[in-house]
Image (cartoon, grey):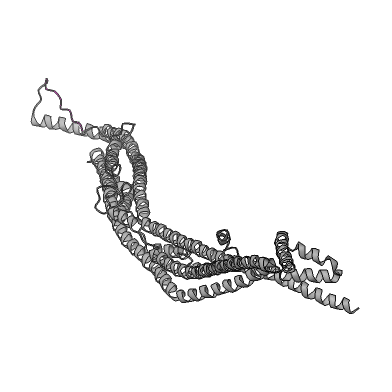
Amino acid sequence: MIQQHYTLAWLNMATLALIPVLVTMCKVQASITSTIAAAQAIAHRGCDDMNAAAARVVSIPAVLRERAYTEMQTTADNLLRGLITAIDTLEGIVLWIIGLYKSTFRCLLGLAVNGVMSVVSKIAGPVQETAENILQGGANVLQQLVGNNQPNQQQPNVSLGDWAGGMQDVQQKVEQWTKGENDPLNALVSAPFEKIKEDIQASLGQWKPPHYNNNNETAGVIASSSDEKMHATTWCTAEPLVNALDDTKTKLHTVICICIVIVVLFIVVIICINMLYMRRRSQFLTQWRRQLAYDLTTHDVKEQDRALRKEQQHALDQELALFGDAHQHAASTLLDPHSRMARWIRTLAIHRYAVYCLLVGVVGLVGTYTLHVIIDKVLVGLTPGFDAAANAWTSDVAGSATSSALQQLDTQLEEINSWITHAEQDINEHAFGVVRSIATAANSTLGVVTQHVTDFVQTTLGGTILEQPAKDILDCVMMFKIDKIEQGLGYIVQHAHVNLTRYEAADVRTTIQSSLQDMQIAPIHDMWQSLNDAVTRTIQGDLTFYWVMLAMWCLAVVCVLSTSIINKALNKK
């Protein structure tokens, strides 16, 4: 029988009042665990963000290098197309100018030849005929004076040449000079341009940007080994902050576990006291029953009857106890209504449920406020160390990691600019070496054209009265213009080059730093505040419950006091 009572020894008001406090402590411990786990996740996420940002920073040189590679290739392709178009245009312009000069010179020369031919036809013909007759007569006289008067001897034929026929030949040569589709001068001019286009196709058509950083692959194909090392670098680690949070969690859990152990010890002590009380009560009841049995055998019938009634009353009370306080209400039915109400309210105020509410409220409030004060003191003591660790971690991440990434960026940008300079020299050497050869060839072509015209004047008009005027016209109409063209081509030779865009490290750093300033590494101090808020919310929720329990008992007490006052007032009336 006593063993059955021992199994229910924990079911007492003190134990049941301490269990909610134990639950509150467990809830606070769970809240601390979840909050610190969330803070650690925030730290890891902040480090992941920083690593991603650093990876973006160190990948900027690769992006810029890829962009520079594309710009180089695009510049070479555009330059190739532009040069081919410029050469075709220049060839057409040169041919047109040469044709214009040829036509102008031919027209002016033809005008002079035709004018001379008109004079020769009207004046030189009769003069030539008269001169020939005079010379013929003189020849005959000389022959007769010499004495050569043989009858069968042939008369000498004296001629001064066919001046008109010679001038007609000159006129025909001028009209037929460089006339028609198969003009040898046009073919002569076009030949160097075709050769230049072939050279450009061979030079720029197969040109590729130089290798970057002495790699065997171009920048657009493979990244350098330094890029791979930088991408493999972990710029931020959350271990220091995570360790600080773990240390905080361990200390808070230690404090809460100590409080839990104390409460459990209280519960164990109360259970032990209750078990001792049950044992003592069982021993007392056993002795009392034995004494009652002895008294029944030794006392008279009246005493036995009185003892029997007590035992029956006790059994009846135990039976009525199964119905709570119903027997008390039944016993009070004989009293007046005001007395019955007062007795019921007094019974309610001291009922075990009301007392349980009082105990739960008082013990819960005392225990919870004590726990809150202890945790606040522990947090205040841990704050300086955590702040130092958090500030050191933030300084490491925001300062050292970012500066290291930016230093790597500066080094990479210097290498890229050196590579761009090399590529610029290479493309100028390949492309504008050809451009200079274009200018040189164009000058040579103009020289060939000039020599061709000069030879034509010398061949056609050499030894005639038109030779010197034709040379004067050539110098006036053509040579002066050709000198200007040669000056322009010489300017091209001196100033033809390509300037590729360089990257300014300061501008890139400014852009990156402005973007990094908007990124929070991790809300460190918000973590600590969120821990305080989480503990406070959990404790405040349980404090509300305990205040409600205490308010229920206070309500019962107020009802008892109010009823007593009302009963006294009614009884006085």
- Which residues fall within the magenta stretch? 151-159
Front one among 547 and 210: 547
Q: Quadrant of the N terminus?
A: bottom right
| Image vertical order of residue 262 relative to residue 96, above or below | below
* Residue 471 in view: no
Q: Residue at x 78, y 75 (%)?
A: 561
Q: Main secondary structure of the magenta part?
A: loop
Would you identify the image quadrant in which residue 557 lies?
Answer: bottom right
Residue furthest right in the image: 573
Q: Position of residue 88 (x, y in %)?
A: 35, 41
Residue lying farthest left?
A: 147
Residue 523 belongs to the span the image colors magenta = no
Depth check: give the residue in front, 184 or 3. 3
Image coords of residue 39 (percent x, y): 48, 63
Image coordinates for residue 282, horizontal then vertical, percent: 59, 65
Q: Nearer the viewer, residue 147 or 76?
A: 76
Along the line of sight, the residue nearer the viewer: 469 or 349: 349
Q: Residue furthest top?
A: 152
- Asked if residue 157 is among those painted magenta in the image, a careful observer would answer yes
- Residue 395's image quarter? bottom left
**Whether residue 514 can be seen here:** yes
